[in-house]
Image: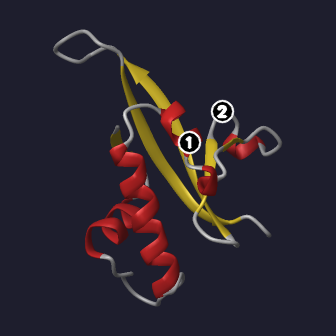
Amino acid sequence: MEVVFINKSLKDLFLTGKEKGKPIYGKDLVKSYIKKVTIIMGCAHSRDLVNFKSLHLEALVKEKKYKGMHSIRVNDQYRLILRFIKSSESIDKDIVEITEIHDLTDYHQ
């Protein structure tokens, strides 16, 4: 699945494995974040993510800010906010699903 990072700092975190400036997340969370994004990239469709029970993929309906988005758990405290977009702009005219990564949030707050 193609992944698009809406948040530039999350893209940099995935590519380098290091936070810029004062660390917010910690090494274990960064390692888990990279692992989860790699799993997403390895899936052909969002429905494949359901097979990974540990991700706890769920639609977000209560929070207006994230309406129409989904989340997966990165660890016990943080979740990754995603939006799945279907696009038929590929060369072979197949429907391609793109995952936008929007945020890494503490869902206990």
Tell me the mark number nearer the camera, choosing from 1 and 2: 1
Residue at x 59% of width, y 40% of height = 50
* Residue at 70% from the left image edge and 45% from the top image edge: 65
Secondary structure beneath disc 2? loop
The dot on residue 51 is 1
Q: Residue furthest bottom?
A: 22
Residue depicted at x 44% and y 42%:
100
Residue located farthest toward the left when viewing the structure as drawn: 91
Query: Is label 1 in a helix, a strand or a loop?
Result: helix
On the question of residue 23 being in view, the answer is yes
Whole-percent x and y of residue 11?
34, 61
Task: Answer with left or right where residue 94 lies relative to residue 5.
Answer: left
Residue 7 located left or right of residue 70: left
Q: Position of residue 3 (x, y in %)?
A: 35, 44
Q: Decide: few, some or many residues near mark 1? Use Cα within 10 Å; few <14, some 14-19, many ≥20.
A: few
Tell which of 25 and 34 is nearer to you.
34
* Residue 80 sits in quarter: bottom right
User: Can residue 5 be seen in the rendering of this structure?
Assistant: no
Q: Which residue is mark 2?
A: 68
Q: Residue 7: x percent and y percent?
A: 43, 57
For image coordinates 46% across by 49% down, the residue present is 101
Q: Position of residue 102 (x, y in %)?
A: 51, 51
Above/below status of 32 relative to 83: below
Quadrant in which the N terminus is drawn: top left
User: Residue 34's image quarter?
Assistant: bottom left
Residue 38 vs 2, above or below: the answer is below
